[in-house]
Amino acid sequence: MKRLAAISLLLALLVAGCRPDEGDVLARVGENVLHRKDVLQLLPEGVTPADSASMVQQYINTWALAHLKVLKAQEVLSADEKDVTDEVRDYRDNLLRYRLEQSYTESALDTTVSEAQMQDYYDTHSQNWKFPYIIAKARIITLSQNSPHYDTIKKTYADTEPEDVAALRELCTSYAERYEEFGGNWMPMPSIAKAVPGLDAESCETIFRGGNKYIKIGDGKDYFIFLTDKIPVGAPAPYEYCRQTIKDAILIQRKQDILLQLEQDLLQEGIESEKLKIYDVEQ
């Protein structure tokens, strides 16, 4: 309530020049009117009174300019330049076509995609899953150089046996600043590089081209990076990495098929109902 009262007072000050019978009118351009309530609802929660006044004034200016430009155009443009009948008709037709296609696909599209369908798509389009960067599962440990278990973690950060990894994870939970496995998911090398300050994708590609582990020495803390699995540049990415992309591609293809069928049905319906008449162009 205090916020609304403060803003109302600010708005009242901004429109102090309005006549009493204009009520909550903030601005007027010709027949267009901007009301106080229309602006009030746009102000975010927690905004200061000073910022409120500035935002209101900016909104009034933006609103006024939009309408003033239309009035100016009416004054200076020729009759032909002001005739937007064709553009309005084209925009309306395009919008109606879009809404028809959207309605048609929403009602006809089967969004269920089975694992078998995705796996088959992956196998059929294997050349599509090659990327110009390494794809890997990574383990990254951020560790203070003063950690009492620094040497132990340094020796074991690239362990792969399940029981050894479990012991490493438990140790890092207590003594490392960060232990990250990215949920065991496949990651593009650029994303892995972003997780380590001072590294970039290009450097990582060079570092991990011939190996799977690396220690990045930092200022007071080091970063232990181990790739638990790796797909080299140019090799097909794993199915799991491409899964969402594959699902999206299948749904896009289904939409295209639905729209193609819609077009064929419309042509056939048009001919049968005689809404469409095609004449011999050689006549």
Image (tube, rainbow, N blue to C red):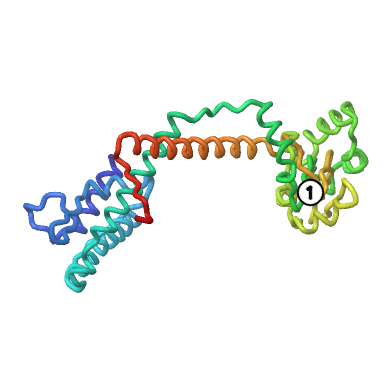
- Where does the image place residue 272, in percent across and percent down from the top left? 34, 34
**Above/below status of 227 relative to 173:** below
Q: Going 76% across and 42% down the picture, which residue do you hit?
A: 237
Q: Residues within 10 Å of mark 1 (few under 14, many from 20)?
A: many
Q: Going 19% across and 66% down the picture, which residue do you hit?
A: 71
The amino acid on which the numbered mark 1 sits, given as a three-letter code, is: Ile
- Where does the image place residue 212, in percent across and percent down from the top left? 87, 46
In the rendered image, the quadrant that contains the C terminus is bottom left
Picture quadrant where residue 172 is located: top right
**Above/below status of 16 relative to 136:** below
Picture quadrant where residue 147 is located: top right
Left or right of 149 in this view: 93: left
Q: Residue furthest front?
A: 283
- Where does the image place residue 139, in percent across and percent down from the top left? 80, 40
Which residue is the site of mark 1? 134
In the rendered image, the quadrant that contains the N terminus is top left
Residue nearest the observer in this picture, 51 or 244: 244
